[in-house]
Amino acid sequence: MAFETPSLFLYMTTILVICSGNTCRSPVGEAILKQKLAENGLFDWVVQSAGTRAVEGQPASTHGLELCRELFDIDLSAHQSKKVDSNTLNAANLVLCMTAQHQKDLLKLDAENQLKIKLLAKMYSEDRFDVPDPFGQDKEAYRRMITTVSNLIDEGLPSIIDACKCIG
């Protein structure tokens, strides 16, 4: 009898970043987190993003696209929005939400994943706060959001890595 090798994907650490429409905050979070993990030698970790109310196939916001390129040399031009579903949620080792409302929405979708659904800000601080949505605002609102997300990931990276090891 031949032994079939299971898919390598089943053993990869996967982090899911969540916002509402998956065009502003979560694509930025996904891209910055991928970059920070790679800088720490974690090239084989998978980072994805999705939205609780996303319309499938939308590009990243123009301001987010421009600022990620300008500030981090990150190209978001290939991003296509995705709506979170229970399969994507189940496949993740850790789910990082931009707001407490996103956490609530995901728990309604699948309460069994409660332990791995975290507020991004809580990975760095005990303070609970939401990352404001810049959708429809000017470039400076996007700059503030990107700076906030980047700082939270920078400061929270050790906790994010530890959480994946504990949960996964």
Image (cartoon, grey):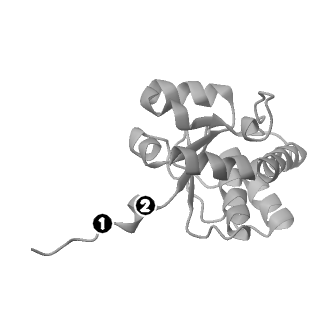
Determine whether 117 is above or below 68 in the image: above
Q: Nearer the viewer, residue 3 or 92?
A: 3
Please report the residue visible at 79 percent of the width from the left and 66 percent of the height from the top: 69
Relative image position of residue 42 (x, y in whole percent): 63, 67
> Label 2's element?
helix
Mark 1 = which residue? 6
Give the alpha-carbon distance from disc 2 to disc 1, as whole Å: 9 Å
Q: Is residue 16 visible?
A: no
Asked if the residue at tag 1 contacts the one at tag 2, i.e. Cβ–Cβ closer than 8 Å, the answer is yes
**24 left or right of 134?**
left
Q: Amino acid at mark 2?
A: Tyr
Relative image position of residue 27 (x, y in whole percent): 65, 52
Q: Earlier in the sequence, mark 2 or mark 1?
A: 1
> Label 1's element?
loop
Please report the residue visible at 73 percent of the width from the left and 62 percent of the height from the top: 36
Q: Nearer the viewer, residue 142 or 123?
A: 123
Q: Residues within 10 Å of mark 2 (few under 14, many from 20)?
A: few
Task: Tally the numbered discs.
Answer: 2
Mark 2 = which residue? 11
Relative image position of residue 144 (x, y in whole percent): 87, 44
Residue 76 figure quarter: bottom right
Q: Is residue 66 visible?
A: yes
Q: Nearer the viewer, residue 2 or 35?
A: 2
Q: Amino acid at mark 1?
A: Pro
Please report the residue visible at 84 percent of the width from the left and 49 percent of the height from the top: 151
Residue 101 figure quarter: top right
Determine whether 126 is above or below 90 in the image: above
**3 left or right of 148?**
left
Q: Residues within 10 Å of mark 1 (few under 14, many from 20)?
A: few
